[in-house]
Amino acid sequence: MIAQELSQRLIAALLIFDESSDELRELDSAVGDGDLGVTVHSIVTAAKSALQELPAEVTPEELLTLMGTTVSTANPSTFGSLVGAGIGAGAKVVAGVTDLSQVDFVRFGWAVSESIARRGKSAVGDKTVLDAIVPSLAALEDSEATGAAALELAIAAAAVSIELSAGEVAKKGRASWAGERGIGTPDAGAVAYLRFLQALRASL
Amino acid sequence: MKKLINDPNSFVDECLEGILLAKKSQLRAVGEDLRAIVDARCPRPGKVGVVTGGGSGHLPIFLGYVGPGLCTGVAVGNVFSSPSVDQILAATRASNGGAGVLFIYGNYGGDVLNFDDAAEIAIAEGIQIETVLVADDVASAPRERKEDRRGVAGLAFAFKVAGAAAARGDSLADVASAARNAIDQMGSMGVGLSPTVLPAAGQPTFTLEEGEMEVGIGIHGERGIRRAPIAPVDEIAEELFDAIASDLALASGDSIAVLVNGMGATPLEELYLLYRRINQMSVAAGYSIERNFVGEYATSLEMAGASVTIMRLNEQLKELLDLPSSPPISGMF
């Protein structure tokens, strides 16, 4: 996928993703501080306008680097900072690629996930966004499906993992302060990632 | 939602515009936007800078503690969200008088990430940085995981102690050590009676039924220890007091400072009812309240509720608490 197509798909997906702002605000309110909906809405607005102003000859690396900066500055909350820096780190691993393959997307995804784990000092099982990202990438790697079918697999893997971790006690972030009272509520950041994948799927 | 606002998305910037207009001889904005604000006398050559920051929605935390005898600079985020690395750096550069800068802020994920990134850049620019995290909410984690706790109204004591030490000319290491001393000796706990509405979200951040309270609530409406039917204020005071006193292992004969804080929508009258019982209990337990502070020190927009912070005093803390300070906004120390 060349940068121009990536940009168009992202804009379409972001518009759909924005519709989950209210749900994310409510989820975050249950155990956190309720600003995730605002963060997602700011990210969508900033990313959309950044993409629309992008010159046509941009490379995927440049586009993703710009997305990283945009996400981390739109609303530099924990989620925005971690995901933004993650996208920035992911952009570096696709340097030099002009036409992104599915393998490139998976490499990009692993770099994002590693950056979030390192900077956020967290791992799978801590009940964070990583609980959704890591299984979705593993599902993509283990399958030969491509395109929409591959995305379906990633969505299913993320959804199952989120449901499982909803029954756990959060070990990181604001939700960890709620302790056992957070059991039963899925991690809002992980749900945000799932909603983004679903938005990408719906935009295809 | 009923608020005195214009566009919810301009809430923070318009608030800062108002503050800068009202206090133009005392505060100034130093970055590319209005989100990095310093004491107008900055930098003070040879003195340590004290920089804080965090989300909006808590005034007088954080901006209200910028001024003579307190913090030198602040980075202001959106409501309940961290400021950016650039905003923190702008406040840091303007606060640097050559003796280094202390970063002192509440223990929240986004703030830690952004302040750590800013520290790395500032150090590369030749500015000495020390970081002290305020983590005083005893309801957010047990004592053995003290460093995981969130920072709440105890931030006010931490700013006062660090700011006083910096203003009198202490070294960066000494300012940081005084602040750590204060944090080691303090504990806070609060109760929430009604939720907060984020201007940009337009909905309450949590729901409490009529007649319910959330014991141990955080200053962003984070869940506490339990939800229960509202009790008489004396009973609430007793629960908060006992939890903090046992966490600090207070002993008869200890000198303490007590801060009773309103969360935004609780009248001063009710805060004094709370103080009354805290004072009675202190006397009964043999603790001597050497200093008391009653008012709004750390709010959560229009949340109703209150918190109690107790700091065990030693000579160093007593001395620093008594040094003069005159922040243009809060003016409460």
Image (cartoon, rainbow, N blue to C red):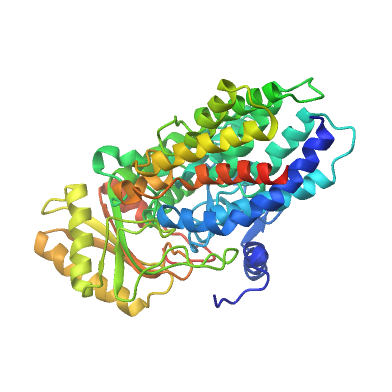
Q: How many marks overall? A: 0
Q: Is residue B61 above or below residue B268?
A: above
Choose between B270 and A81: the one closer to the eye.
Answer: A81
Q: Is residue B102 above or below residue A100?
A: below
Instruction: Using residue B138 as the reference point, say whether residue A21 is left or right of it.
Output: right
Instruction: Using residue A99 as the reference point, say whether residue B300 is left or right of it.
Output: left
Instruction: Using residue B311 as the reference point, say whether residue B194 is left or right of it.
Output: right
In which quadrant will I find the N terminus of chain B? Answer: bottom right
The location of residue A68, given as percent across then percent down, is 68, 37
Residue B41, visible in the rendered structure: no
Residue A102, visible in the rendered structure: yes
In which quadrant will I find the C terminus of chain B? Answer: bottom left
Q: Residue at x 57, y 33 (%)?
A: A153
The location of residue A23, given as percent across then percent down, is 53, 57
The location of residue B180, given as percent across then percent down, is 36, 41
Choose between B278 and A150: the one closer to the eye.
Answer: A150
Q: Is residue B295 above or below residue A144?
A: below
The location of residue A129, given as percent across then percent down, is 50, 38
Q: Quadrant of residue B218?
A: bottom left
Instruction: Using residue B295 as the reference point, say whether residue A192 is left or right of it.
Output: right
Q: Residue at x 41, y 59 (%)?
A: B219
Q: Residue at x 53, y 50 (%)?
A: B53
Q: Quadrant of residue B18?
A: bottom right
Choose between B256 and B200: the one closer to the eye.
Answer: B200
Q: Is residue A149 above or below residue A99?
A: below
